[in-house]
Amino acid sequence: MKIGMRTIKTSIAVTLSISLGYILGLNSPFFAGVAAIIAMQGNLVDSYKMGKNRILGTVLGATVGLLGSLIFVGNPLLIGIGIIIIIQICNKLGWSKSISIATIVFISIMMNVEGEKIYYSLNRVLDTMVGIVVAVVVNFIISPPLTKNKIYAASENIIKEFSQALKTIILNEDCALNDSCLKEIEDKLEAINNEYPILLEEQNIHLYRKDTNAIDLELSRGLIKKLYSNINIMTQMGTGFKIHKDNADILNSLYGLNLVGNDITDNLDIVYNYHLGASLDCLERLKTMFGIL
């Protein structure tokens, strides 16, 4: 069974975090390993967010825990009050994703009956920061899961499938008459739409260098959506329509066919050829953008 890259990177991050914990003499390298596991996400934006939330939560939990432990270590009532305080602070500052780790760290410090409270609190923060920093660096250096690359690959695949679907419709094959023909394309289009907001966040935190020769993914996404819309309409219209000479010439060049074009007068033929022409225009532009022959 093939081992995934994220699994390998998680293993490396945990190994490095625990090793670094030993080297730095941290109180509990265990927490560094746990932080590394949590911070190793499927994309760099999520790694950054998870790491940020965990650091904020750890610092808050350690601070409140330290103050509480100076009053009365292990007191259940004081722990309950501290939980309320932490949750209220997180909600007020918009740190809702940090609540869990903040309360866990708080309880761990409040229940630490033995040992120096300040030393223990600082070690919880350092453990967490070591694990998160190591995980983010490993995720970025080793085969970074850049959303841009995912969208490139998904876009290339969907363009090729659109090209095949259009040929299928023109040749009046069976799947041109039902929605299932475009189902797989719909799923990939949805995947691109889901990844796009992550791409924008990666751009906002400057993960990419500015490249004037890079493909405009916003433009390509718009063309793909327009292409899908036109092909979907053609699919719903059915088959048996006359093809205009201009469209026939493009189709013959694109697919190596021998279609004979017609002069169009019927209204339905005109509508069909409008959507066909729009589809061909989008397809040609996308193929040029992605260098697809």
Image: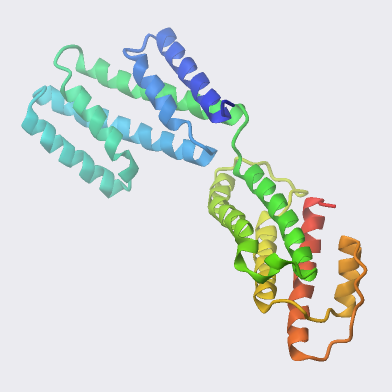
Relative vertical location of residue 137 with respect to residue 246 in this rendering, above or below:
above
Q: Nearer the viewer, residue 60 or 83?
A: 83
Residue 70 x %, y %: 13, 23
- Looking at the image, residue 77 sits to the left or right of residue 133; the answer is left
Relative vertical location of residue 33 with respect to residue 148 in this rendering, above or below:
above
User: Quarter of the image holding residue 267?
Assistant: bottom right
User: Which image quarter holds the N terminus?
Assistant: top right
Residue 193 x %, y %: 57, 56
- Looking at the image, residue 277 sits to the left or right of residue 194; the answer is right
Relative vertical location of residue 98 with respect to residue 170 in this rendering, above or below:
above
Looking at the rendered structure, the number of numbered marks drawn on it comes to 0
Residue 129 x %, y %: 40, 25
Q: Nearer the viewer, residue 96 or 168?
A: 168
Q: Is residue 107 visible?
A: yes
Residue appearing at x 69%, y 60% in the figure: 219
Relative vertical location of residue 56 with respect to residue 203 in this rendering, above or below:
above
Q: Is residue 95 visible?
A: no
User: Quarter of the image holding residue 112?
Assistant: top left
Residue 92 x %, y %: 26, 49
- Colour scheme in use: rainbow
